[in-house]
Image (cartoon, grey):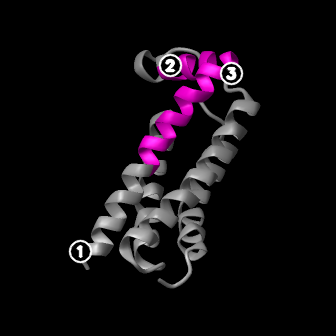
Amino acid sequence: MLRIVLGVIGGFFAWVIVWFATEKGLSAIWPAFGVHQRAFEEAIKNGGQFTADATMLLTHIVVGSIISVMAGALAALIAGENSRAPLVVGILLLLMGVMKAVMSWQYVPLWYHVILTAILLPMAIVGGRLISNI
């Protein structure tokens, strides 16, 4: 049970760290991504106008999918099992995705909220299943 809890904690925090590191890395090598991110963060903090760019949103969806698979796999590796820990990580990611959608509802199109939020749980489960029974 302790390993499952540690797997969940490790997978979730790894997701958060890799997500932010990826955003910073993309902002550094792709200036348009950085401009888009800063404008979005400014709109969230202070209100105002923000126009979402579909390319940036699709990039977030792809990155979110990949990182969720990695988080589920890490949770399974740490836990020594590949079902419960990735499922709980996926549920936590889903809850975080819903919270993010609520915070940014007015700034981002509905399709983005639905897709990004919907992929978090299944991708974490897929990541866990990629780790064979340990």
Residue at the image point whose x is 57% and y is 28% from the top: 25
Camera-side residue: 6 or 98? 6
Quarter of the N terminus within the rendering = bottom left
What are the residue bounds of the magenta stretch?
15-41
- Image marks 2 and 1: residues in contact by CB distance under 8 Å: no
Q: Is residue 66 above or below residue 39?
A: below
Camera-side residue: 74 or 54? 74
SS assignment for the magenta stretch, majority: helix
Question: Mark 1: which amino acid?
Answer: Leu
Is label 3 in a helix, a strand or a loop?
A: loop
Say which residue label 3 marks.
30
Say which residue label 2 marks.
43
Image location (x, y in percent) of residue 53: 72, 26
Is label 1 in a helix, a strand or a loop?
A: helix
Question: Mark 3: which amino acid?
Answer: Trp
Which quadrant of the figure has residue 91? bottom left
